[in-house]
Structure formats: C-alpha cells, structure tokens
Image (cartoon, rainbow, N blue to C red):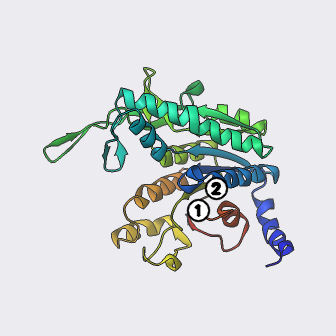
Amino acid sequence: MKDIDVLIEALPYIKEFHNKKILIKYGGHAMIDDEAKSSTARDTVLLKYVGMKPLIVHGGGPEISRSMEKLGKESKFIKGLRVTDEETMDIIEMVLAGKISSDIVSEIIKHDGDAISLSGKDSRLIYAHKKEARKIGDEVIDLGLVGEVDEIGSDLLEMFLNHDIIPVISPIGTAADGTSLNLNADTAAGEVASAVGAEKLIILTDVPGVLRDPSDPTSLIQKIRISEVPGLIEEGIITGGMIPKIETCVKAIENGVKSCHIIDGRKEHAMLFEIFTTNGIGTMIFE
C-alpha cells in the first residue's frame, strides 16, 4: 500500500474519533524495550495531534519484581496476583509512581507531547478498598494490600485533558483511611476508561490477541461480541491470563466504552494500525 493510501484509509477514523478519549493500557514489550517505549510514546502523541484525547494507565510487574530482588525481597503470587505487604507496597509505589510513570512522561515530552504523572492517590483519583480474604478449601487466602476499585475521580482527568495534557496513571489506589493499595493495572484501566467515557480501551500485550489455536498466530479472532465471551471461555479458547483482560473489556463495554482492543505491543505502530485501518491488527471486543 502506498503511503498516500494509508492516509486516505485513516481519514474516516480520524474524523470519527476526533475529540474522543482513548484509554491506552501500557504493558508488555512496550514497557520494557527502549525502542518500543519510544515508539509507543510517539504514537500516543500522534493521537493527540490528530485530535484525540489519549490517557495512559500502565503496569510494571516485571520491574517491581526486579526491584524487589535487588532489595533482597522475594516476590510471592497467588493466582497471578502479587501478595502485597507494607514493604512490598512501598516498593510498588517507588517503581510505579517514582520510575515507570516518570519515564513514560519523559518519552512523551521528548516527542513534543505534554503529559503528567499521576498516582491513583493524587487528589483522590482512585478510591479503593482492600480485597477481602477468601477461603479456598482449608486455606484462607489473603493478598494483603491488594485493592479493588470503588470510584474514579474523573474531574481531575478531565481538567488535564481539556488542557491537552496526557494523564499517565499508576495503578495505586487509596483506601478511606489513606492506606495505599496495589491495583491490577488492566482492571484500573477499564475503570478509568468507563469513568471518563472513553471511546476505546486499548490493551497493549505481548500476544497477537485472542487466538483460536494458541500455537497458530494466524488463528487470530479479530472481532468478539461480549455475548460470545462465555462460550469462548467454556471452549478453552480464552484461557489463563487472557480471561481477566477479556473480563475487564466486557465490564468496560457494559459501562459505556464503545470498544476494547487487545493488541500486540511488540509490533511497531500496532496501536495506529488498530485505530486507523479497516482490518486492524488485534482482537476487538464490542457489544
């Protein structure tokens, strides 16, 4: 395809999504590889300059684990969720809000965008409560300072968006008593997308999307209606770590987000291909 054809194909999407909010959940390769980080930040800035209003929620699990190892503290997980004591929570805040969020902001500014680093604790941005302990068999599972979102302070985000500033949000919540809580980044992204009335939620991962056959990257399912999700889970097509991502998408759509997209952040400009081309590049979940 010629460069001019790409622009022509993108035009109706630029018009359709003008002034619309796009929530991007940074994760996987886009968070680790320096070149990918720069490319993803540049693509995010491009969205702003063609008239959209991007917001970012980021994860940081691998970086947290590396920092804990350096500090001589072992990471512990139960069903994919990090067990979080007070010392671990301190490390999480240091890594997410102190390093990763600031690094993303720096990359955006490098590409002539304006951005601000926010923790969910800033100005009561993300209210949350501690996840309750659960009994599984004879064992009581308590994840510690792991939270579930209660409320998003969207007014703060609207203020920045109205001034063309891209919010970069660390998934840290604050409880009623001021306690910091560790939040699942995908879940936080879905809650923020719903609260601000985002047109799209885009989740960057290290897989092509939802595959009918995990061993065959050409078996990508490009579009999934939320009504099809239970059947795909029952068939074993949506499994493992993809289940909470899909459940986040379903909840976001039920709360007003128009579509959710799970795309491969390892592919250069994946986000732009997904938004601005007819075929896209990943899996779109919609009503």
Amino acid bearing label 1:
Arg
**Which residue does the numbered mark 2 point to in the structure image?**
36
| Left or right: 14 as drawn, with respect to 279 | right
**Which residue does the numbered mark 1 point to in the structure image?**
266
Which disc number belongs to residue 123? none
| Left or right: 77 as drawn, with respect to 195 | left
Closer to the camera in the image, 217 or 131: 217
The image quarter in which residue 143 lies: top left
The image quarter in which residue 264 lies: bottom right
| Left or right: 225 as drawn, with respect to 258 | left
Q: What percent of the width, then of the height, locates residue 54?
A: 70, 47
| Left or right: 246 as drawn, with respect to 75 | right
- Measuring 66% from the left and 74% from the top, which residue is drawn there? 279
Q: Are marks 2 and 1 in contact (CB under 8 Å)?
A: yes
Amino acid bearing label 2:
Ala
Marks 2 and 1, the one that precedes in the sequence: 2
Closer to the camera in the image, 167 or 76: 76
* Mark 2: secondary structure: helix
- Image quarter where the C terminus lies is bottom right
Q: What percent of the width, then of the height, locates residue 70?
A: 42, 36
In the image, residue 221 sits, relative to residue 36, either above or below, namely below
In the image, residue 98 sits, relative to residue 21, either above or below, namely above
- Measuring 69% from the left and 51% from the top, which residue is drawn there? 38
